[in-house]
Image (spheres, coloured by chain):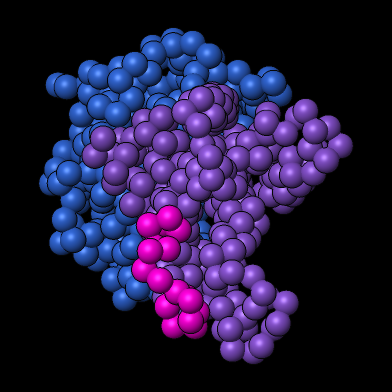
């Protein structure tokens, strides 16, 4: 099985003492991994370090065998991500925003843009300015922007933020479809335990910057999470 | 190279959607036309005393010392400080930091060239309509003057980008750019020896090209402008590369 992500000894410390310490994480191609942890535990920091948005103080990230720090462009090419608020130029439409993204890849066609707009339910709004969108609609655009490059690894940080029930169901369906049809690997960070439980086969608990792992099993995820947090302290 | 070209197009598209850009493009056309109309048709006798070419170069001065620097400050603030504030500066895309930085600088520089060319076209067309003394022989020298004016503007772009990366607030960025630019314009009146050390001094260097540019002067000035660009660009890139999303 090809390794989609290999993180070795990653540490990132901020001046407020928060951050992540000595994270080691391996994710196989096709896995859906959930990242869980209290606020400030380092989930977003981990995802930012995984995608080169932030440089770790130490440690190494390999994506599909390519080292991120030394070969950023090649390593990041098969990756789609939504980290934090959706990155969009708000005085442009979702179609134009996706068109701009497509220029950075050699194989994205206009049909691909239409398809991803359809997948995220944005087709009726594709020519409206993103500034007129609600938070949930912007989040849908963010998910579309993560899917557009036909990535082999998709990293989503709090993808359910602001989504209505329709959006939530659509997101779940899209993740399940993309994962089963194309074998895409997902790394999803969320506070929605029940949503992660429905999607993920493995979980990474980040508590006080340290990581521990749990394979999906018979015990409810919420109970496992509470125990982990109680043992480690908030 | 393809990535730089693709992202330069993206940055140009972003700038084009801004109202301020459209306003500057409109001003580049309207100001020369209205000036010519006023001077030639509304009997402004003081202005009529000026030869046509002088009015054309006064318009160029207005653009290279006021309009285009202001446009550059707005663009640099928007593409760097503004995007930093809106968290859109860095994305998970196959583009290196240098390519991203360079394509933004290229986009601003291309837009300043477009503004200059638009202004030149407006000046020439309105001259041919309104100026009785207009001759085709003025075209090469005026085009040359407009074109050489672009080079110190590129240096000013690198300067503005460097300042845009020094601060985290758009308001602070644009106000510090304007204040520093005004200081650069007025400091030679207090310290005349500083004149040749300030990039803003060279914005109207086309005058020298049109008069008695010696080879030594060209070499000295070009070397100074290239060195200033390299310095501002390098410091700007250093700060850009250190930024984290």
* Quarter of the C terminus of chain A within the rendering: top right
Magenta-span inclusion, residue A160: no
Q: Nearer the viewer, residue A32 or B238?
A: B238
Magenta-span inclusion, residue B137: yes
Q: Please give the name of the residue rendered at 80% of the width and 33% of the height, measured from the top-left corner.
A: B192
As drawn, A125 above or below A109: below
**Colour seen for chain B:** purple
Q: Nearer the viewer, residue B5 or B83?
A: B5
Apparent side of residue A74 relative to residue A157 in the rendered image (left or right): left
As drawn, A47 above or below B168: above
* Quarter of the N terminus of chain A within the rendering: top left
Q: Which residues are magenta?
A: B127-143
Apparent side of residue A76 relative to residue B189 in the rendered image (left or right): left
Write down which chain is painted blue.
A
Q: Where in the figure is residue A185, as x and y percent of width and height?
A: 25, 35
Q: Is residue A99 visible?
A: yes
Q: Please give the name of the residue rendered at 61% of the width and 57% of the height, measured from the top-left corner.
A: B61
């Amino acid at each position: 099985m090809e390794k989609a992500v290999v993180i070795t000894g990653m540490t990132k410390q901020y001046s407020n003492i928060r951050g992540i310490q000595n994270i080691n994480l391996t994710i196989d191609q096709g896995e859906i991994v959930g990242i869980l942890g209290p606020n400030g535990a380092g989930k977003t920091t981990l995802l930012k370090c995984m995608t080169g948005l932030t440089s770790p103080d130490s440690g190494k990230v390999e994506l599909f065998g390519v080292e991120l720090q030394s070969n950023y462009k090649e390593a990041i090419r098969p990756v789609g991500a939504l980290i934090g608020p959706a990155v969009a130029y708000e005085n442009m439409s979702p179609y134009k925003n996706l068109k701009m993204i497509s220029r950075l890849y050699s194989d994205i066609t206009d049909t691909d843009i239409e398809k991803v707009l359809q997948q995220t339910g944005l087709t009726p709004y594709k020519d409206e300015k993103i500034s007129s969108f609600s938070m949930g609609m912007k989040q849908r655009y963010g998910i579309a922007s993560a899917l557009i490059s036909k990535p082999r690894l998709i990293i989503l940080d709090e993808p359910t933020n602001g989504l209505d029930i329709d959006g939530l169901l659509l997101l779940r369906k899209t993740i399940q479809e993309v994962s089963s049809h194309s074998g895409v690997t997902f790394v999803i960070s969320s506070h929605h335990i029940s949503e992660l439980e429905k999607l993920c086969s493995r979980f990474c608990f980040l508590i006080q910057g340290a990581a521990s792992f749990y394979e999906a099993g018979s015990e409810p995820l919420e109970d496992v999470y509470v125990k982990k947090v109680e043992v480690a302290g908030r | 190279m393809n990535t730089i070209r693709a992202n330069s197009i993206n940055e140009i598209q972003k700038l084009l959607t801004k109202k301020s850009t459209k306003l500057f493009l409109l001003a580049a056309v309207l100001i020369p036309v209205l000036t010519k109309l006023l001077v030639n048709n509304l009997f402004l006798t003081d202005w009529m005393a000026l030869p046509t070419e002088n009015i054309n170069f006064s318009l160029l001065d207005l653009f290279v010392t006021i309009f285009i620097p202001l446009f550059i400050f707005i663009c640099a603030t928007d593409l760097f400080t503004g995007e930093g504030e809106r968290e859109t500066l860095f994305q998970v895309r196959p583009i290196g930091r240098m390519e991203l930085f360079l394509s933004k600088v290229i986009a601003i520089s291309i837009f300043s060239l477009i503004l200059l060319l638009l202004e030149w076209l407006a000046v020439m067309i309105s001259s041919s309509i309104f100026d009785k003394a207009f001759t085709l022989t003025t075209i090469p020298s005026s085009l040359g003057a407009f074109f050489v004016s672009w080079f110190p503007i590129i240096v000013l772009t690198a300067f503005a980008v460097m300042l845009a990366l020094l601060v985290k607030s758009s308001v602070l960025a644009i106000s510090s750019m304007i204040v520093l630019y005004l200081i650069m314009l007025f400091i030679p009146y207090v310290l005349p020896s500083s004149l040749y050390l300030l990039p803003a001094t060279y914005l109207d260097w086309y005058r020298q090209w049109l008069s008695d540019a010696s080879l030594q002067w060209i070499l000295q000035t070009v070397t100074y402008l290239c060195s200033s660009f390299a310095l501002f660009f390098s410091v700007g890139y250093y700060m850009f590369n250190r930024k984290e999303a």
